[in-house]
Amino acid sequence: MKVITLSAALLAATAFTAPAFANDTMAELKAGGLYYINSENVQMAQEDLYLSMKEVRVDYVFHNSGDTDETSVIAFPMPDVEGSGDFMVTIPNENSDNFMDFSVSVEGKEVKTKLDQHAFAAEVDVTALLRKYNVPLQPYGQATSQALNGLSEDVLKDMMSRGMVVNIPYSDTADGPMKDDYVPMWKLKTTYWWTNTFPAGSDVHVSHRYKPSVGGTTGLRFLNYGDGERFSGETFDQEKIQYCMDDGFLKSVGKRLDAAGPDETPLVENWMSYVLTTGQNWGGTIGKFHLTVDKGDPNNLISFCGNGIKKTGPTTFEMSADDFYPEKDIDLMILVKPDWNQPQ
């Protein structure tokens, strides 16, 4: 049976602005779109992709050019989520197995998907052990923390020996006693899947939706906070390339900074990404590709890479291409006004 896969690879891209803001940085999960393997007759005729900080929408048209119907397993691997004692990732719905609120429809009808979910530590499947002690498989979230810290010392010692958890003691006060806090270190792999038939010589419309993971930090990490030009340094050089920051974008950032008060933070960084290069596994091009990016608020500033991008509304940017072959992923930098203004 052929397999069609909706890719959602993990990018735990930690990011820091000035050192004082390091603990206020949240990493993103990098999710992606659809690719298929060994599907000779089923081509992607169209893809309409919508990206915003609140929702990702992808609408596909598949065409079966063969003489027979094809039934395939279609899968959507969610981004891997790996526990860490060093940083956190943004999870839209951390208390649910469906932590990005994924949904899919075929020909306008919602499809009931099946769930395949496993936890790994040191490349060993520890799903059964976590279920045995009623510990949620999701590494992040209050329910997981409470379940772990309620286990016996012997069980926790065993989990530590397996590389499943680490103990990071903390104190409620500067001079108070230290308390144990057992932090998950396992990796969660989640896949939603279903079967689909592609009739010979026909089109099939498939749509899916999910809430993106949006990373961010409490400042502008690409600024040079030391001596020299404000737009300079290693981090600036890296982000200028990654997000295709041009002179117009930097000029707008400079104006916001110049207009801000001495104790005001006028803009903070948000990042989100979409794995587009998985399209290279399709064995062909996308017949018609259309992208819409919505920055959310007219006052937000946005920068990302693309060819032929046009501003089509107060918050929207679009591009279209025929016989599109994706060569790089989409990385968005969206600068927003924080809902707080206080000394940094």
Image (spheres, rainbow, N blue to C red):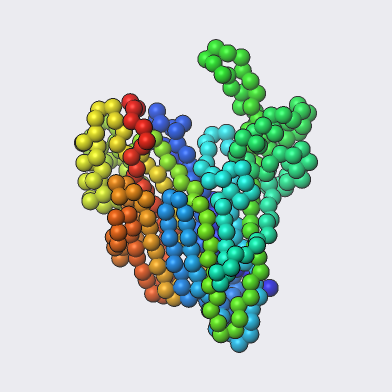
**Among the 4 quarters of the image, the one containing residue 83:** top right
Q: Quadrant of the N terminus?
A: bottom right
Q: Where's the C terminus, which quadrant?
A: top left
Q: Residue furthest top?
A: 175
Residue at image x 67%, y 34%?
A: 165
The one of 95 and 32 positioned closer to us in this rendering: 95
Q: Is residue 301 visible?
A: no
Please state if 97 lies on the left or on the right of 259 as rendered: right
Residue found at the very far front of the displayed protein:
109
Name the residue located 34 percent from the left edge and 63 percent from the top edge.
318
Residue 151 position, x and y percent, is 74, 30
Residue found at x 78% / y 41%: 132
Residue at point 65%, 61% (across, down): 113
Residue 185 image position (x, y, % from top left): 63, 38
Observer-nearest of 208 and 153: 208
Could you tell whether 92 is left or right of 154 in the image? left
Query: Where 294 sits versus 270, above or below?
Result: below
